[in-house]
Amino acid sequence: MKLEIKKIGNSTGIILPKEFLARLGLKQGQSVYITELPEGGARLTPYDPDFDEAMSIMDDLMDEYKDTLKALAK
């Protein structure tokens, strides 16, 4: 999909087609995240990559300390 960078008021932006927004499950006013890829380019996603990383760390910690967490829950 080729998109044109346009002037929008005093800013610059890219208009995303509504079919693309529908495929991502996004509506006007919602946030998207852009991640720069190491090989060049970028990835646009509705999911916060920092949140996914934090959840992965929490999963590891919960596995490591499951007995402690279970004892604290009593």
Image: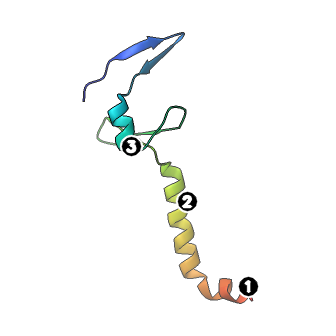
> Could you tell me which secondary element the residue under label 3 belongs to?
helix
Quarter that holds the N terminus: top left
The residue labelled by disc 3 is 24
Residue at horizontal 49%, vertical 57%? 52
Q: How is the image coloured?
A: rainbow
Classify 10 Å Cα crowding around label 1: few (below 14), some (14-19), many (20 and above): few
Whether residue 37 is visible to the viewer of this picture, yes or no, is: no
The mark that comes first in sequence, 2 or 1, is 2
> Which residue is nearer to you in this view: 37 or 24?
24
How much space separates mark 2 and mark 3, taking CA atoms? 22 Å
From the viewer's side, name the closer residue of 26 and 11: 26
Sequence-wise, the earlier of marks 2 and 3 is 3
* Image quarter of the C terminus: bottom right
| Quarter assignment of residue 45 | top left
Q: Residue 44 shows which numbered tag?
A: none
Residue 27: x and y in percent read 48, 36
At label 2, the amino acid type is Ala
Q: In the image, what residue occupies the spot 30% across and 23% down?
A: 3
Looking at the rendering, which quadrant does residue 73 occupy?
Answer: bottom right
Q: Which mark is residue 72?
A: 1
